[in-house]
């Protein structure tokens, strides 16, 4: 049976999974941990999450049954209790308290300037970024240079999006990779505002290279001559425009004509059906053409409350069950043999890859590889220089001609 949900006074509302295409492919996890109904470990945090949405993103509440706070609290308490990501809050009272305090007091992001930092936009409800105080670093923190990053004039190596040099510097790269797909370079001083540039990484942090000069990005409504001058690369009639992800109010978008859900004001609580933006289906309503609200599952073409998880033996529709496969309308146990069909995971130490169970690939140092993705270290040592030119590469597979190796260090570039 599915785990019980927290009683919040909303009769009939449970924490079953949604049938939204992007949500359903995930899983609510097993309900094996002690129920949050027993110890209340997550209830206060779930209330804080919903209070934050009510204060900063009220249109997000339309994603829940009856557009209610009670359904929101029930959904998040269930997600925290049934997902492994919630364990950090159960085990760390300090983190949980800090997160709650932050949610109740932090400033609200500007939906015009940070349009995707909205739960009313977020595709994956279970991975919404609640902030650093809740154990989720900001993008800036994730991309910041490591503490031992090389300084100006020292050798550097480009690992991808993470800054390769100390603050105030950038890595001027060689054209051809020296280690697999990795390119070496030298840390150079960033260019100040108003100085000539060729690419944005040369400019001081927070600025970009536009029309050959380092400039601060211009906000919506400011004058522009070229798209690259604008924060959202949108210059129309000499004025910087809004982001393509900026929201229109839910109430204004509801009932408007549409060709797809992307025409519905960037509101995740609306779906395009019969060429009109319509509210997500609620408990007992048809989900044949319109997805269910969060916390409900689409079964027999109707939105139903099935608890926190869809476990083996429970009714299901299409492909989606928690960790298992929906077969003939019933959630089946995890597949446990090679080549069996799988949804998310397999039993007996097998991994689910491209819909089939298989033995996990050997990814340790010394294993053969085609690309960096094949290695636990993130580095496949193979000569790809002949496939690279002008800073870009087009690398074919090679029947695992490379070898997984330790990631090169900037000192290896000297």
Image (cartoon, rainbow, N blue to C red):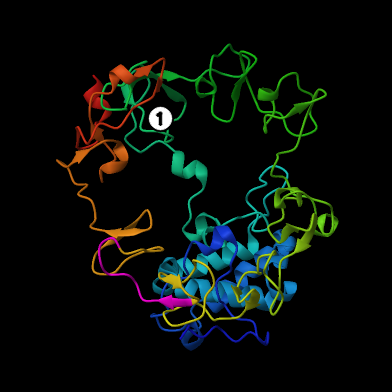
Where is residue 30? Give x, y as percent: 41, 75
Vertical position of residue 264 compared to residue 65: above or below: above
Overall secondary structure of the magenta section: loop
Point out the residue furthest to the front here: 328
Q: How many marks?
A: 1
Is 407 displayed left or right of 136 in the figure? left
Residue holding disc 1: 166
Q: Residue at x 25, y 67 (%)?
A: 337
Where is residue 409? Give x, y as percent: 25, 31
Q: Could you say which is closer to the camera, residue 131 or residue 2?
A: 2
Instruction: Give the magenta range.
Output: 330-339
Point out the residue furthest to the left here: 366
- Specify the quadrant of the image occupied by residue 373: top left
Q: Is residue 407 visible?
A: yes
- The answer to if 331 sits in the magenta stretch is yes
- The answer to if 74 sits in the magenta stretch is no
Q: Could you say which is closer to the camera, residue 346 or residue 205?
A: 346
Where is residue 364? Give x, y as percent: 19, 46
Q: Residue at x 28, y 60 (%)?
A: 339
Is 244 displayed left or right of 248 in the figure? left
Tell me the quadrant of the picture where the N terminus can be found.
Answer: bottom left
- Specify the quadrant of the image occupied by residue 220: top right
Is 318 displayed left or right of 151 in the figure? right
Q: Could you say which is closer to the camera, residue 329 or residue 27?
A: 329
Vertical position of residue 139 compared to residue 100: above or below: above
Q: Residues within 10 Å of mark 1 (few under 14, many from 20)?
A: many
Tell me the quadrant of the picture where the C terminus can be found.
Answer: top left
Q: Could you say which is closer to the camera, residue 133 or residue 345?
A: 345
Q: Is residue 130 visible?
A: no
Is 208 displayed left or right of 62 in the figure? left
């Amino acid at each position: 049976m599915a785990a019980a949900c927290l009683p919040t006074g909303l009769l009939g509302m449970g924490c079953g999974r949604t049938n939204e295409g992007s949500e359903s492919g995930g899983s609510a996890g097993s309900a094996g941990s002690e129920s949050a109904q027993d110890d209340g470990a997550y209830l206060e945090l779930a209330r804080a999450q919903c209070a934050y949405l009510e204060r900063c993103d009220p249109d997000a509440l339309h994603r829940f049954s009856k557009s209610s706070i009670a359904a929101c609290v029930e959904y998040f308490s269930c997600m925290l209790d049934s997902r492994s990501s919630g364990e950090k809050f159960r085990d760390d009272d300090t983190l949980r308290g800090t997160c709650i305090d932050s949610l109740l007091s932090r400033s609200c992001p500007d939906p015009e300037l940070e349009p995707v930092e909205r739960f009313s936009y977020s595709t994956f409800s279970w991975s919404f970024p609640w902030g650093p105080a809740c154990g989720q670093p900001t993008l800036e923190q994730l991309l910041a240079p490591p503490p031992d990053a090389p300084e100006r004039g020292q050798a550097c190596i480009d690992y991808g999006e993470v800054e390769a040099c100390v603050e105030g510097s950038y890595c001027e790269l060689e054209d051809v990779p020296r280690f697999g797909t990795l390119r070496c370079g030298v840390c150079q001083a960033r260019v100040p505002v108003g100085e000539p540039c060729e690419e944005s990484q040369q400019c001081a942090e927070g600025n970009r290279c536009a029309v050959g000069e380092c400039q601060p990005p211009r906000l919506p409504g400011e004058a522009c001559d070229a798209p690259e001058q604008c924060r959202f690369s949108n210059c129309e009639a000499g004025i910087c425009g809004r982001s393509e992800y900026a929201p229109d109010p839910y109430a204004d978008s509801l009932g408007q004509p549409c060709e797809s859900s992307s025409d519905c004001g960037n509101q995740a609580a609306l779906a395009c059906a019969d060429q009109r933006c319509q509210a997500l289906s609620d408990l007992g309503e048809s989900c044949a053409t319109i997805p269910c609200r969060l916390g409900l599952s689409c079964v027999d073409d109707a939105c139903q409350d099935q608890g926190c998880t869809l476990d083996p033996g429970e009714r299901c529709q299409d492909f989606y069950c928690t960790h298992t496969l929906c077969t003939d309308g019933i959630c089946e146990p995890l597949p446990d043999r090679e080549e069996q069909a799988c949804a998310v995971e397999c039993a007996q130490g097998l991994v689910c890859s491209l819909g089939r169970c298989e033995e996990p690939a050997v990814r340790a140092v010394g294993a053969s590889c085609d690309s960096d993705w094949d290695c636990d270290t993130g580095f496949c040592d193979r000569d790809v220089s002949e496939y690279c030119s002008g800073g870009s590469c087009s690398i074919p597979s090679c029947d695992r001609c490379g070898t997984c190796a330790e990631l090169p260090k900037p000192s290896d570039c000297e």
